[in-house]
Image (cartoon, helix red, strand yellow):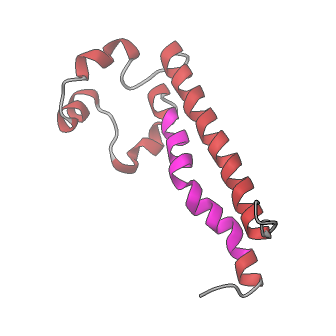
Amino acid sequence: MSDGTKPTEEQLKYASTLHILGLGGLLILLLGFIIYIVELVPSIVPVAQVPKYWSLKVDEYVARTGMPTKWQWVHFLNHADIISFVGIVILASATILCMLIVLPTFLKKKDIP
């Protein structure tokens, strides 16, 4: 740091966890996309059919494709077009997971409001 201070233990844990989750999430997102495009695994909506659904509203899209909504996607992780969701979930929940990692350190130091 520019003012000569060193990062705290909590900051280092948070940063390293965020780094791992960020890279991991992006990697899963990228691999999921490649698996979908190359069609290595069956998908709910095949790549070739995606353009015909672009103009639909969400409710029409879900009705025509059978795409899962809410947390139903968890049951479809064996489909190529759903695999990328895991990367999105990791990226979206990274901050919460980082805080859970540093929470024991805060509690041990009694550094709580």
Q: Residue 40, percent across and down?
A: 55, 16
Q: Is residue 89 magenta?
A: yes
Q: Residue 86, percent across and down?
A: 53, 41
Q: Is residue 56 magenta?
A: no
Q: Is residue 10 left or right of residue 99?
A: right
Q: Is residue 81 left or right of residue 104?
A: left
Q: Quadrant of the C terminus?
A: bottom right
Residue 41 in sight in this render = no
Span highlighted in magenta in the image: 83-104
Q: Is residue 2 left or right of residue 92?
A: right
When asked about the image quadrant of residue 11, the answer is bottom right
Compared with residue 16, is residue 86 higher up or lower down, i.e. above or below? Answer: above
Provide the major secondary structure of the magenta segment: helix
Q: Quadrant of the N terminus?
A: bottom right
Count of numbered badges drawn on the protein: 0
Residue 91 in sight in this render = yes
The foreground one among 108 and 2 is 2
What residue sits 68% from the left and 74% below the top?
A: 103
What residue sits 38% from the left and 18% below the top?
A: 46
The foreground one among 77 and 6 is 6
Compared with residue 17, is residue 30 higher up or lower down, i.e. above or below? Answer: above
Q: Is residue 65 left or right of residue 16?
A: left
Q: Residue 100, percent across and down?
A: 64, 67
What residue sits 56% from the left and 48% below the top?
A: 90
Q: Residue 37, percent across and down?
A: 49, 16
